[in-house]
Amino acid sequence: MEAKIKAFMDEVKTRNGHEPEFIQAVQEVAETVIPYIAKHKIYNGKNILLRMVEPERLVSFRVAWVDDDGEIHVNRGYRIQMNSAIGPYKGGLRFHPTVNASILKFLAFEQVFKNSLTTLPMGGGKGGSDFDPKGKSDDEVMRFCHAFMLELNRHIGPNTDVPAGDIGVGAREIGFLFGMYKKIRNEFTGVLTGKGRSWGGSLIRPEATGYGTVYFAQSMMQTNGMDLKGKDVVISGSGNVAQYAAEKALHLGAKILTLSDSQGYIHDTDGIDEEKLAYVMDLKNNKRGRISEYADKYSAATFYKGETPWTVKCDIALPCATQNELDGEDAKALVKNGCVCVAEGANMPSTPEAIHEFHEGKILFAPGKASNAGGVATSGLEMSQNSLRISWSREEVDQRLKDIMEDIHDSCVKYGKDDDGYCNYVKGANIAGFVKVADAMLAQGVI
Ligand code: NDP
């Protein structure tokens, strides 16, 4: 089996040699899915995984825009349409200086499995730009978004490809993008998700990724006779996913000890309560400030510059910032300090070495493609509401989100149980996600 996996990965590396994040994501899937393929004849000899690692389409384009001083800037825009076997491409847009083809291909590849797990009919895609919204005025962000959509509009549509937000793309950016799409195409459709409430957005969509991650963690804990109530929780990030993961964990009775951003983390020994979280939301979403300011305001908190929060003793860890933010040493510290559950709110935040440590330590570990699927699932619900031209209540969307997260959890357990009873959620998520997409690809023939 190892030789088969190596031969497959050698081919992937030859074609994608300069794309380390993409190779990392494919390696993790190959290690769990190739043994499954070998045991199931219908997939034999079909090169199905090789077809899945090649994007159906990859678009790269120039985005030229003018700043407030009249200076012209050029950024690179992308849309990666990875797989449409089970529905229109669906996946977020990321605006961050680190964005490149490797990062977007890994995200698009993960998205295919994640969307399949949601049980909704959505293919996988991802896009974005190396544009950095930080430090830009609202007008500059608007001009950039409009320029980006001038090209992107040719490649997307409500039945073709439906982008959403991701790092650096929140409600403000989705508004500007939607406005330009509507103007160019002269149609009001559900072409983007994460829209404002008064123009087609779904209740609970902003909360969905963070809430869903905590629902998933709660399912893992309960399946193993534990609960979130009274537990110490360490969270990284302070953006959309981190904020609502903190909110839901608080609702379920947990104590939140940390939040972070790219400059460091804050540790509040008294816990981040509802009032303090409201301060963080205002600081990050309206004032666009830094998390270090939290420690200036609250005396129980300390800011640790340039560090990540994984050495803080906790029961549960929720990495909600970015890829590869938690390495093998961090994972060792978490396990040693008694952490029993790690659920990824971000995409691929744990390195392969970290995942190895979690599995060795036999603690509960949920990969992002399962535990953060609540965001795209609720985007799927937003698409349904747009098509039906109706709007579901907050309670209704939240209940559907909860049900979907429980279904994803059960699928992971179905395919992920090891012989000793330990649930390997990575294996479970990869195989469950693979089966639905692979079966659709087989049915549709070699295309
Ligand atoms: P936001 O832009 O709202 O927040 C991102 C947070 O992560 C910020 O606190 C940011 O800090 C921090 N961060 C970004 N880059 C780094 C870095 N290199 N090192 C340390 N911290 C960093 O993004 P989201 O909350 O939407 O996304 C967070 C993660 O969740 C991403 O991996 C995303 O792909 C994933 N995700 C998001 C979904 C969604 O619905 N939004 C859905 C599913 C997954 P700073 O402000 O300093 O940059």
Image (tube, rainbow, N blue to C red):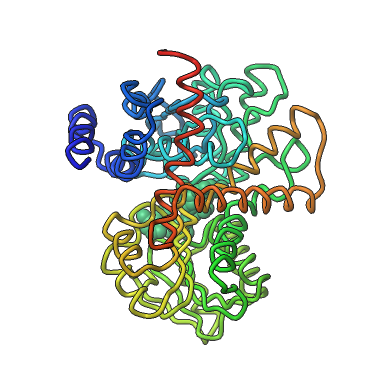
Q: Residue at x 45, y 75 (%)?
A: 266
* 96 relative to 18 in the view: left or right: right
The image shows residue 343 at horizontal and vertical percentages of 48, 61
Write down the quadrant of residue 254 in the picture: bottom right
- Residue 419 as seen in the image, left or right of residue 139: left
Residue 151: % across, % down: 49, 21
Q: Nearer the viewer, residue 145 or 349?
A: 349
Q: Position of residue 50 (x, y in %)?
A: 31, 26
Report if residue 59 is visible in the image.
no
Quadrant of the image containing the N terminus: top left
The one nearer the camera, 216 or 303, is 216
Query: At which x and y percent is residue 221?
Result: 55, 68
**Residue 43 drawn above or below residue 111:** above
363 vs 386: above or below? below
212 displayed left or right of 130: right
Which quadrant of the rendered structure holds the C terminus?
Answer: top left
Q: Residue at x 20, y 33 (%)?
A: 13
How many numbered circles does the render carry?
0
Left or right? Give the position of 277 relative to 443.
right
In the image, 120 versus 193, the foreground residue is: 120
Q: Nearer the viewer, residue 345 or 139?
A: 345
The residue at 75%/36% (across/down) is 199
Instruction: Classify residue 285 by image quadrant.
Output: bottom right
In percent of the image, x 62 and y 42: which residue is there? Answer: 377
183 relative to 383, above or below: above
Camera sees residue 367: yes
